[in-house]
Image: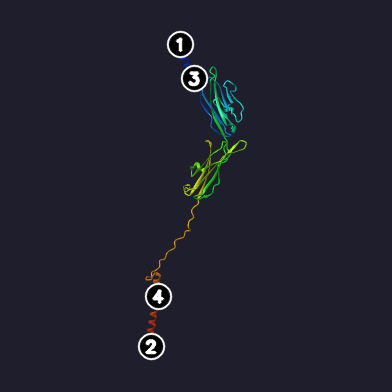
Amino acid sequence: MDISHRNSYGFAILLFIVLIQDFTESLRLTEVRIPNHVIRNNSVRLECHFDMNGEALYSVKWYKDGYEFYRYVPRDHPPAQVFEQNGIYVNLHNSTDNQVVLENVTLASTGRYRCEVSAEAPSFQTVSDHGDMVVVATPENGPIITGGKARYQIGDMVRLNCTSGRSKPAAHLQWFINSEPAEQGLTRHYETLVTGREGLETTTLGLEFRVRPRHFKKGDMKLKCLATIASIYWKSNEESVEGDRPLRTPYSSPIESRESVPPHSSSKADRVQASSSSKNVSIFISSVLIKTILFIISSAFFR
C-alpha cells in the first residue's frame, strides 16, 4: 500500500471516529410525556425532556396535528410565544422549555402532539417525538338497565338492554352474571347512536339467555352492566332478581291416629265406666238389704 492510500485510509478512520463522537455527544430527547386520555374541561401538562450534551438550545416547539401552537426560544424576550389554534389554550405562566400547560381542554383538543428541540449553531441539530391525546366527554349518568323482571323461573328467557350515557368516545359496555363475565354468545350488539353538535355517542348492549339452575346463588341472580372509557371512566349498574320459589303444599299438622280398641280389651275410660257401674250395683244391693232387715225387725217388734 503506498503512502497516499495509507493517509486516505487513516483520514477516513479519524473522520468516522469524530462523527461517532459527535453523534453520541449530541442533542437527544430523553422523554416526551403526553397523556393518552384526559377528561374534558381539565388542564393537562405536556412534557418534553432533553439532554443538550454541551450544545446550546436554540428552540423548543410544540405542534398539534402538524401545526405549531407553542414556541420557546431562550434568547427571545419574552422567550415563550403562542400561536392560536382551535381547542388550544396555553397557560403561559406555567409553560417553560420543558413543559407546556393546556387549560380547559375540549373535544377539539384531541390530536397528535409533537415536541421538536433544536440546537444552536454550528450543529443546528433537531430532534422530535410525538404522542396522541384523546379528550374524553364522560357520560353524565351511569349505564341504565331496562327490560328486567323482579322474578324469574327456571326456563324463563332473560332479555335485557344496557344503555350508556352520551359520551365521546363511546363507552365500552360489558355484562356480568353473578360477577362472572357473560359469554359473547349471550350478548347482542346494537348500532352506536350519534347525537348533537359534538357528536356524542350512545351505546347499547343486550343480554339474552335462558335461566338455568346454576344462575341462582342462594335464590338470587345478580346481573351487572359495566361501562368504561379507557382508564378514566368506570361505572356500573346492577340488578338483583329472585327466583320464583316452588309452591309448597299447604302444611297441616298430622292427624292424631287413634288406635281402635280390640273387643276383648277395655280402654281406661271403659274401665272407669265399668267401675262406676259396679259401685252403683253394690249400693243398690246394700240399700235393699238394709230395708229388708229393718222390715223384719219392725215386724217382730209389733207381734
* Mark 2 and mark 4: Cα distance apart in space: 33 Å
Which of marks 4 and 1 precedes in the sequence? 1
Q: Is mark 1 on a helix, strand or loop?
A: helix
Looking at the image, is mark 2 or mark 4 nearer the viewer? 4
The residue that disc 4 covers is 277
Tell me which amino acid carries mark 1: His
In the rendered view, tell whether residue 75 sits above or below residue 136.
Answer: above
The residue that disc 3 covers is 23
Tell me which amino acid carries mark 4: Ser
Q: How crowded is mark 3: few (under 14 residues within 10 Å), some or many (20 or more)?
A: few
Nearer-the-camera pick, 121 or 114 = 114
- Name, please, the residue furthest toward the top: 3
The residue that disc 1 covers is 5
Nearer-the-camera pick, 37 or 155 = 155
Looking at the image, is mark 1 or mark 2 nearer the viewer? 1
Tell me which amino acid carries mark 3: Phe
Q: Residue 178 at x, y = what percent? A: 48, 45
Q: In this view, does 293 lie to the left or right of 59?
A: left
In the rendered view, tell whether residue 140 sits above or below residue 88.
Answer: below
Nearer-the-camera pick, 37 or 207 = 207
Snapshot quadrant of residue 2: top left
* Mark 4 and mark 3: Cα distance apart in space: 135 Å
Looking at the image, is mark 4 or mark 3 nearer the viewer? 3
**Quadrant placement of the C terminus:** bottom left
Snapshot quadrant of residue 193: top right
The residue that disc 2 covers is 299
Which of marks 3 and 4 precedes in the sequence? 3
